[in-house]
Image: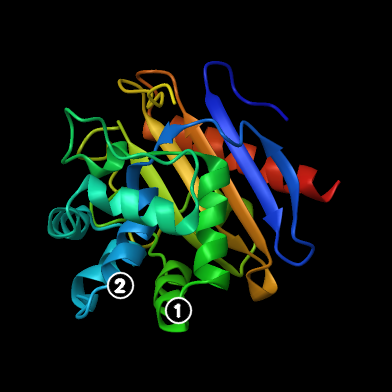
Amino acid sequence: MTVPAGVRAGYVVYDRGSGKVLLQDGARRTFRSASVVKILIALDHLRGERPDLALLRPMLRSSDDGAATRFWKRGGKGAIIERTAARIGLRDTAPPPADKPGFWGYTALSPLDVAKVYRYVLEKAPRAHRDLIMGELRKATPCGTDRYDQYFGIPRALPRPWAVKQGWSGFGDVPAVPCKASVVPAAAPDLGLGRPVLHTTGVVGPDDRRIVVVLTLHPAGSSFRVASQRLTSLTRQVYRAADS
């Protein structure tokens, strides 16, 4: 496996058919979550009496940050992470640092925990919650609401069917090249603050058989284009290696 110089990576490929991890490295290495945490936010919100589906759907499908921020405040901020981590049994997941309670994207998580989240959604969550979350992730739009390209990693490296939740942070509020809809498809956690993160996570194949999680932290100053190319290449290598 070739991880580009200066990039910190962690990945897991889990096969639900055999119940085995096919490939992993740095599986318990922590990263700041960026938008991957939106799955946890959705799971927590859906346990309420009147879920706000008008906000929830675009948060999952198009990674709407405004929706995530509203749910974050409503749910008690870091308490959302504490509740869901305890419910699912996540060992490496933690709320944002105490001095950044409003930054949901600074939640700490590991590739292994993300894989556990997908397993929970697919195997243990109430059917209505599973169908809504996975249904929106299957319809992930090419562009996020912030006009960043969402089709890096799994969407570009692997064939359909897939359902994905991507994450990006540290590349600026506005992309250098705005995405267009025509795009082709114990110790405090080390969050890598000051360096950009780019994550691809999801399920791949018939019957959502494989869970694929690739989390990456890139050198400061990396462009989104270069980072997404690195991640897509690594994702392709990881998936092929899991079959070898």
SS of the residue under disc 1 = loop
* Residue under pointer 1: 126
Give neighbour class at mark 2: few <14, some 14-19, many 20+ (Cα, 10 Å): some
Q: Amino acid at mark 2?
A: Leu
Question: What kind of colouring is applied to the model shown?
Answer: rainbow
**Which residue does the image show at 39% across and 60% down from the upper left?**
142
Q: Is residue 125 visible?
A: yes
Q: Is residue 160 left or right of residue 179?
A: right
Specify the farthest residue to the right.
244
Q: Residue at x 19, y 49 (%)?
A: 77
Q: Residue at 47% of width from left, 82% of height from top?
A: 127
Q: Which residue is label 2 attached to?
A: 46
* In the rendered image, the vertical position of residue 12 relative to residue 66, given as above or below: above
How far apart are the two marked residues, 2 and 1, measured between alpha carbons?
10 Å
Q: Amino acid at mark 1?
A: Pro
Give whichever of 185, 23 is nearer the camera: 23
Splitting the image into 4 quarters, where does residue 17 fall? bottom right
- 36 up-or-down from 172: above or below: below
Q: Quadrant of residue 34?
A: top left
Q: Is residue 238 left or right of residue 138?
A: right
Query: What x and y, as percent, mark residue 60?
Result: 34, 64
- Residue 82: percent from the left, percent from the top? 33, 48
Count of picture labels? 2
> Is residue 150 at all visible to an observer of this figure?
no
Residue shown at 24%/50% (left/top)?
79
Packing grade of label 1 (10 A; few <14, some 14-19, many >=20) is some
Residue 22 picture location, percent across and down: 77, 48
Q: Is residue 216 above or below residue 242?
A: above
